[in-house]
Amino acid sequence: MKYVASRIAQAFLTLIVFMLVIFVATRAAGDPAMLVLPVDASQAQIDSMRAQIGTDRSYVTQFGIFLKDMSTFNFGRSIIAREPVTKLIPSRIGNSLRLQLASLILILATAFPLGVYAATRRGRLPDRVIRFVAAFGQAAPGFWVGLVLMSIFAVRLGWVPAGGMGDGGLSDWKYYVLPTFTTSLLLFASMTRLLRSSMLETLDAEFVKLARAKGVSSRRVVWVHVFRNALLPIMTFMAIWVGTAVSGSVVTEVVFDWPGIGSTFIRAIVSRDFPIIQAVVGLIAATVLAANLIVDLLYAVVDPRIRVGSTKAIAARSGGS
């Protein structure tokens, strides 16, 4: 329980600090009232708009209202669209999550088996090919990959649409092909290389040698003993990926005109629509912290030594004080 309580407390304090950073950053970007109103607006009009937005109050008061609103999911109204943010964001998040879910399925179906296969064929031709593909995936800019794929498969060959999301018909899967591959490439490359290196490190462990000496089959050693222990860094990596899943792949959504939260976030930054910016960034922060908290708790399930070590450390600090 002490382990769980300490992780929850750390996540809560981190969230408060992050909210302060969001608040300061959005206010430092400029006065949104000056962006909404025409250039020749009078001072009275400017003051009236600031009162509507809430930027006429002190920063301390604004931050208190900001924390209260964020805790109750009251993100205010979009300055540009003049609609509640809670009506604008959910559909965009849904579109982004659909794309990220398709990408995750593709990644799990390729990165895990290829990472394990490369580790078990270390130094051989399959390992070299997989490492080359993974290195290319990490080095290639996302926007360049998207534009190249669009030029070949959408413009020249005409096999799939160049952008958009479709109208809800059975043929909508064609709209997912290019953005899914573009979004998956970097994560696939990173996860494949990380899993390979983690597997190689675990394969040299003493308990693996002991299992082999006892006559355990190679398949069971790899997929039961080694793979489980190699998952720890993958779990951390997936927790980071959750933030990307919530925000959407900004580059991919812009290139393929995908109506997700990432493209909405970019438009909000350009127009200084800080209610949307605060809502999106706050949502990303809360989701990433929650994902990391879950991963910390799962660590203790996968490797009980983590829970025991953390508990002893907490007890030692308590005794010392």
Image (spheres, rainbow, N blue to C red):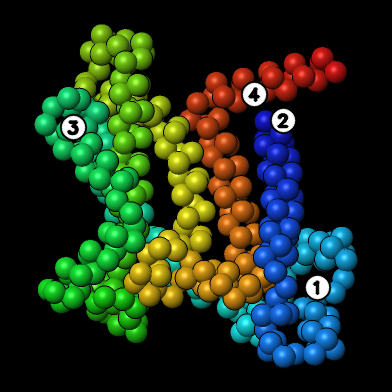
- The residue mark sitting in front, 2 or 1, is 1
Q: Mark 2 is on which residue type? A: Lys
Say which residue appears at 33% left-offset and 54% top-offset: 141
* CB contact under 8 Å: marks 2 and 1: no
Place of residue 8 in the rendered image (x, y in percent of width and height, measured from the top left): 69, 41
| Nearer to us: label 2 or label 4 | 4
Q: Quadrant of the N terminus?
A: top right
Report, in whole angstroms, how far the alpha carbon at label 3 lies from the one at label 2.
Answer: 43 Å
Element under disc 4: helix
Q: Amino acid at mark 3?
A: Asp
Q: Position of residue 234 (x, y in %)?
A: 42, 37
Q: CA distance from mark 2 to mark 1?
A: 42 Å
For disc 3, the neighbor class at 10 Å (few under 14, some 14 to 19, many from 20) is: some
> Are there few (<14), some (14-19), or many (20+) residues within 10 Å of tag 4?
some
According to the picture, the residue beneath numbered tag 1 turns out to be 55
* Residue at the spot of label 3: 127
Side of 63 where 268 appears, left or right: left
Q: Earlier in the sequence, mark 2 or mark 4?
A: 2
- The residue sitting at 36% across, 35% down in the picture is 194
